[in-house]
Image (cartoon, grey):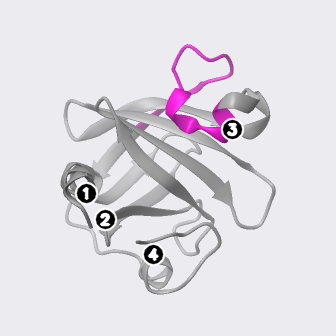
């Protein structure tokens, strides 16, 4: 890991933890930094893995990620910024709403793009990492890349 990657990893570390998302309603997201890569599996039912956010990067204090659900063709992109009271605010777009240029390079994702679904993530304190998330962190999954 070079200096730039280490600096990025330190900055991404603040997103680690368990989050409750407003979209999809009640989704639980578990974020963990492994080998400098932010991994974020999520569950819609809290008892099984539904999908993951991947290709996460930080640009100008904004977290950008792609997402996909494993049991459907549902995919898209996510934009989040730190907000008060242990929350993250931003938006979610399904893949069909994104211009081809953003599909290829999410660094151009912006809240000004049409079709954004507003989203809030609330940090859940003092909760154990669910079994489905631990399994994800320990196994290989599609689009899950760790350096």
Q: Could you say whether the residue bearing mark 3 is in a helix, strand or loop? A: helix
Q: Is residue 23 located in the magenta-colored stretch of the structure?
A: no
Q: Earlier in the sequence, mark 4 or mark 3?
A: 3
Q: Earlier in the sequence, mark 4 or mark 2?
A: 2
Front-lying residue, 12 or 100 = 100
> In the orientation shown, which residue stands out farthest toward the front?
2
Q: Give the residues in magenta.
A: 102-120
Badge 3: residue crowd in 10 Å (few <14, some 14–19, many ≥20): some
Tell me whether the residue at label 1 lies in contact with that at label 2, contact meaning CB atoms closer than 8 angstroms: yes
Q: Could you say whether the residue bearing mark 4 is in a helix, strand or loop? A: helix
- Mark 2, residue position: 36
Badge 2: residue crowd in 10 Å (few <14, some 14–19, many ≥20): some
Of badges 4 and 2, nearer the viewer stands: 2
Instruction: Work out whether 9 lies above or below 21.
Output: below
Of badges 4 and 3, nearer the viewer stands: 3
User: What mark, if any, has residue 63 been given in the picture?
Assistant: none
Q: Residue at x 73, y 26 (%)?
A: 99
User: What mark, if any, has residue 9 been given in the picture?
Assistant: 1
Direction from residue 33 to residue 3 in the image, left or right: left
Report, in whole angstroms, how far the alpha carbon at label 4 lies from the one at label 2. 18 Å
Q: Earlier in the sequence, mark 1 or mark 3?
A: 1
**Residue 103 location in percent, x, y?**
69, 38
Q: Earlier in the sequence, mark 3 or mark 2?
A: 2
Front-lying residue, 20 or 92 = 92
- Mark 3, residue position: 103
- Mark 4, residue position: 133
């Amino acid at each position: 890991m070079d200096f730039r990657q280490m600096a990025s990893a330190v900055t991404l570390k603040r997103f680690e933890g368990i989050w409750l998302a407003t979209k999809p309603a009640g989704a639980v997201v578990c974020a963990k930094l492994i080998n400098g890569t932010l991994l974020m599996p999520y569950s819609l039912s809290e008892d099984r893995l539904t999908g993951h956010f991947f290709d996460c990067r930080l640009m100008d204090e904004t977290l950008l990620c792609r997402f996909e659900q494993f049991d459907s063709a549902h995919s898209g992109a996510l934009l989040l910024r730190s907000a008060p009271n242990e929350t993250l605010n931003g938006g979610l777009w399904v893949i069909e709403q994104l211009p081809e240029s953003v599909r290829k390079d999410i660094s151009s994702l912006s809240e000004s793009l049409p079709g954004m679904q507003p989203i809030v993530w609330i940090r859940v304190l003092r909760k154990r990492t669910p079994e489905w998330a631990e399994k994800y962190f320990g196994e290989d999954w599609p689009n899950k890349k760790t350096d």
